[in-house]
Image: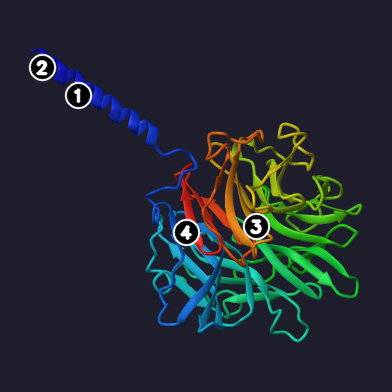
Amino acid sequence: MKNKRISIVTAILILQLAFLMTETTKAASGDADPTFGNNGSLMYTNPYTSGNIYPSYTLVKMAVQSDNKIVVAGSETVVSSGITHDTYLLLKRLNANGSADTGFGFLGDSLTFKNADIQVSDVAIQANGNILVCGSFGYYHRNDSANSFFVARFFSNGILDTNFGNGSGFVITDFLDSSSANAMAIRSDGRIIVVGATYSVSADSLKFAVARYYSNGTLDTSFSGNGRVVTGWGENRNTANSVVLQPNNKILVGGTARVNGADSFALVQLNADGTLDNGFGTGGKVSTDIGEAGVIYSLALQPDKYTTVNGQKILAVGNIYGDLIALARYNPDGSLDASFGSGGKITTSAGTTPYRKALSKKGFYQADEKIIVVTANIDIGALFFQKTSVTRFTLSGSLDASFGNSGQVVLNYDEGGSIGNIGGGLQSDGKILVNGRDFIERLLP
């Protein structure tokens, strides 16, 4: 009987120990998701590799479909014996678990626009599953060494959609002497808004550039008369990097502008007809001196439950000189939201030594209203090697200590020669996706 009692006690102790070990090893918020790819990550490999011919690839931005499949846009250059041959626009689609979607393109990859000199900047999914890509076209293949806005559309299977752009599958749009498209958004009625910058040689002037297209790719002439808006601040150093749409279809554009000699966070809000919204900031414009060399790379609207008749609060994510993440949150009228950070602004360290140049290229809200910021941390002194970090903030702007290491996760990838090609997104279960030049990782929420 005594031995039986000992056996029972021993069994209970073993069960308790097993429970404690399980609790100790339980996956935590910010950990790599072992059910995705190879223990949470996927290094991009190309199905065409053979012999001494291999791809050099750059993944730029991602979008998540409603079925949680992942579309990543960028470029691929085929290299043979160290010599560059052909460059393509690359679209890659993955299943929700990170495996290649072999029903897309060829074994999950779509390669188009061979040697067309296209610099991809953004990707978005239309309501019917078609895929839009925007970027810049033409620097090397035009006699005037100028760029133009470029937008292309693909069917959901990765084939170029020649119903878009008068039978070509793409459109090219000029503003001033040279223009670059940096981001886009899609209205609920299918109209497409693309933003970037346009440069005048004679005036030595760089301005925000905004174009709106009908869903078939033709310019929407109900927008500013010709489908295009050029605007900015008078010191002529303005670049738009991000765009979001308010629920009332007003267009909010974010970037950087030189104001009173300082590069600042810059926001412009346009009415649906392309005119400046006088109810926003001063004459439709807001500039914020958040620190030296301030620049917005990403915008996000606060979750829907905070929507007012004037729109939603606006989160701006970027950087300032000194290698700091910079965030600001604005009320719908463009005033700073005093409930966020210090007077509506936050600056914080963006990485660990020696990764000392920060580019925060993506920011978004989780369903629980916490804020995710994806940052490229670059060691300028080591051939531009880059690590990517993910930082999480609470709704009020403090670092979320429950995420990763005191609010930050540094991903274990070093990338040479690729500065700031990073993106991110959320799947419907809240899992966090991040891409760099040649990897995709999924983190637990």
Q: Name the foreground residue: 111 vs 58.
A: 58
Q: Which circle, 3 or 4, is nearer the viewer?
A: 3
Amino acid type for the residue under numbered disc 4: Ile
The numbered mark at residue 3 is 2
Looking at the image, do the residues carrying marks 2 and 3 touch, with CB atoms under 8 Å apart? Answer: no
SS label for mark 3 = strand
The numbered mark at residue 11 is 1
The residue pinned by badge 3 equals 378
Q: CA distance from mark 1 to mark 2?
A: 12 Å
The numbered mark at residue 70 is 4
SS label for mark 4 = strand
Q: Position of residue 88 (x, y in %)?
A: 55, 78
The numbered mark at residue 303 is none
Amino acid type for the residue under numbered disc 3: Ile
Query: Which mark sits nearer the N-terminus, 1 or 4?
Result: 1
Question: Is 31 drawn above or below residue 396 in the view shown?
Answer: below
SS label for mark 1 = helix
Amino acid type for the residue under numbered disc 2: Asn
Q: CA distance from mark 2 to mark 4?
A: 58 Å
